[in-house]
């Protein structure tokens, strides 16, 4: 494995050394970016000139004098405007860099981080005995993509699916099952759909008794106490709800084409034993105080109605622990036992106040030190076509499986129309990859903190910023490579490049830089935008530059090489977003 330094970094290095040759005492960020006028423009000289009270154009001219131009890297550099540098890179350097990426296999020359940390990613956290909804979809899709991106940079990630598997709501369910033991079929006998319908039935039935029968209500309340004190029989019944739910969760994650590891499903219940200690430590250190019997934490800057402080409740007056206590205990575990340097929570933005309070409490308690970053990647709401939170026509929340099935059905129509030589089975398989890809891409291509409209027609469209468009670009390249037969892709750095080849090449070279930036900013949409632009640049290249009918055999090979590297970059980038790239469509 040989990593490749991007052209951007190489040019930057040259500029930095030219700057320090000109002004040995100064350091300056050249502020290099891609430009329409040349390949790159550097604007950093302006700030440097201001600092050293020099004339910017003169300073720029001095810097340029320290740069060797030629075929190796910088072909041409000139001063423009008030003191910008316009830089053109040599064709040979572009092709040479891409050849090194092509030779590096799966990693495409992208280096690994020098000092990787440990990021615990809290994502895909549905609730036991409840249907999953579109909010859970977002957490799963965004979390999975961020995790792959971080892994690719060399960061070590640990997943935590903080499922809602604990709390007072289980009293009613367990008591009902205790009184009607046959109502829940064993988890090993059901599929995902049956599991959820069983759970729904038990939920409704127990709710009805709970609402109608005061004595049952009392028995359910006692059951909560039994659960919290670890009563064996109660825990066994509780476990049956968890197991049944997991069958359902796994079926949805499978539909989502997402791998979830059992050992990373560590729900609220896992922190049950640690919660009393969490409370004790907070109380002893004075971080939490008793208020009307409850143990709470106050914050100066968090106030509600009438300017009353809104506290974080660690322990209720009746002694029960809730959501905050489990999250605080989880932080202790993730920092002290898992040695996390970063805690990332992919959770609905509506819980951002909760996390603000939890993080601040953990900081005061010393569990989150200066060396640990905690971040809530709060995502926005999925909206229906009417711009309101996504609901069925009857006003109910949409079942996630129904929505995914519908996406796959729509995708099947698109696939069927295009590909006439596919068998029905192939169509179904492609449709799953296209439909699920479309749902994921629509989610990931908008900034996570924004709301977006769930519009299936738009999502499976072949035109525009969709995964289908990217998948077609990939499949089209594969078909060209197949047509090339015996002729293999090969780089020829001696060839002069067409403008469209240069644009494509420079973009291909920026893949690693883009993934690093997008991962650091928790911004999968930046990677999506990169891939969309890659497909567009490829389309322009393909329109302007004949591949199999190019002028010389070297030209054919070199263009096939550009095609192949584009395909591999698309494939890798899409995989990081959790999206498949079928070989044929
Ligand atoms: N189960 C919760 C819900 O559905 C999300 C859990 C988020 N993670 C956490 N550590 N609190 O709203």
Image: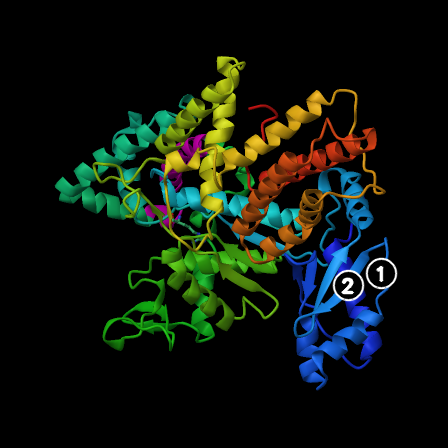
Task: Give whichever of 373, 398 is nearer the camera.
Answer: 398
> Residue at the spot x=45%, y=47% of the render?
139
Give the percent coordinates (x, y) of residue 211: 16, 42
Q: Magenta includes 365?
A: no
Residue behind mark 1: 69
Quarter placement of the N terminus: top right
State the SS at label 1.
loop
What segment carries the magenta color?
226-252
Q: Magenta segment, principal secondary structure?
A: helix
Asked if the residue at tag 2 contacts the one at tag 1, i.e. Cβ–Cβ closer than 8 Å, the answer is yes
Between 420 and 582, the one lying in front of the other is: 420
Q: Residue at x 80, y 41 (%)?
A: 99
Circle 1 crowding by C-alpha within 10 Å: few under 14, some 14–19, many from 20:
some
Residue under label 2: 77
Q: Quadrant of the C terminus?
A: top right
For marks 1 and 2 on the same chain, the one whose residue lies earlier in the sequence: 1
Q: Which mark is residue 174?
A: none
């Amino acid at each position: 494995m040989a990593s490749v330094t991007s052209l951007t970094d190489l040019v930057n290095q040259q500029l930095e050394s030219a700057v320090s040759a000109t002004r040995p005492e100064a350091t300056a960020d050249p502020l290099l970016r891609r430009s329409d006028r040349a390949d790159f423009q550097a604007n950093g000289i302006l700030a440097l000139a201001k600092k050293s009270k020099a004339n910017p154009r003169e300073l720029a001219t001095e810097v340029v004098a320290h740069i060797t131009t030629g075929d190796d890297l910088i072909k041409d550099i000139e001063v423009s405007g008030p003191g910008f540098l316009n830089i053109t890179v040599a064709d040979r350097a572009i092709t040479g860099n891409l050849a090194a990426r092509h030779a590096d296999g799966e990693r495409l020359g992208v280096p690994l981080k020098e000092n990787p940390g440990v990021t615990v990613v809290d994502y895909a956290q549905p609730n036991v005995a409840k249907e999953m909804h579109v909010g859970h979809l977002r957490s799963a899709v965004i979390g999975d993509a961020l995790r792959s991106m971080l892994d690719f940079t060399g960061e070590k990630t640990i997943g935590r699916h903080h499922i809602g598997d604990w709390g007072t709501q289980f009293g009613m369910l367990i008591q009902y099952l205790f009184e009607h033991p046959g109502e829940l079929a064993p988890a090993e006998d059901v599929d995902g759909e049956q599991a959820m319908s069983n759970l729904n039935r038990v939920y409704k039935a127990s709710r009805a008794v709970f609402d109608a029968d005061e004595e049952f209500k009392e028995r359910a309340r006692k059951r909560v106490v039994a659960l919290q004190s670890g009563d064996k029989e109660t825990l066994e019944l509780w476990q049956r709800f968890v197991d049944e739910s997991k069958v359902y969760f796994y079926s949805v994650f499978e539909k989502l084409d997402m791998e979830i590891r059992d050992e990373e499903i560590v729900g609220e219940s896992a922190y049950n034993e640690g919660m009393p200690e969490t409370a004790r430590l907070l109380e002893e250190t004075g971080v939490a105080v008793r208020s009307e019997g409850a143990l709470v934490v106050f914050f100066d800057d968090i106030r509600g109605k009438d300017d009353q402080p809104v506290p974080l409740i660690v322990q209720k007056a009746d002694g029960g622990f809730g959501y905050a206590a489990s999250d605080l205990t989880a932080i202790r575990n993730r920092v002290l036992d898992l040695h996390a340097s970063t805690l990332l929570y992919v959770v609905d933005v509506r819980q951002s106040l909760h996390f603000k309070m939890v993080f601040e409490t953990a900081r005061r308690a010393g569990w989150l030190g200066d060396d640990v970053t905690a971040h809530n990647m709060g995502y926005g709401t999925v909206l229906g076509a009417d711009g309101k939170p996504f609901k069925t026509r009857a006003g109910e929340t949409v079942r996630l499986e129904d929505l995914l099935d519908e996406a796959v059905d729509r995708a099947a129509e698109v696939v069927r129309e295009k590909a006439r030589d596919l068998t029905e089975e192939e169509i179904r398989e492609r449709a799953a990859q296209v439909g699920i890809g479309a749902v994921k891409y629509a989610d990931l291509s908008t900034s996570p903190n924004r709301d977006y409209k769930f519009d299936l027609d738009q999502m499976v469209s072949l035109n525009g910023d969709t995964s289908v468009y990217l998948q077609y670009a990939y499949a089209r390249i594969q078909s060209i490579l197949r047509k090339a037969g015996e002729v293999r892709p090969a780089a020829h750095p001696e060839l002069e490049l067409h403008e469209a080849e240069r644009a494509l090449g420079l973009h291909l070279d920026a893949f690693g830089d883009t993934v690093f930036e997008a991962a650091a900013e928790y911004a999968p949409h930046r990677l999506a935008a990169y891939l969309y632009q890659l497909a567009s640049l490829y389309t322009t290249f393909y329109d302007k530059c004949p591949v199999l009918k190019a002028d010389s055999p070297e030209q054919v090979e070199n263009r096939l090489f550009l095609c192949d590297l584009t395909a591999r970059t698309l494939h890798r980038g899409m995989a990081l977003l959790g999206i498949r790239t079928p070989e044929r469509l």
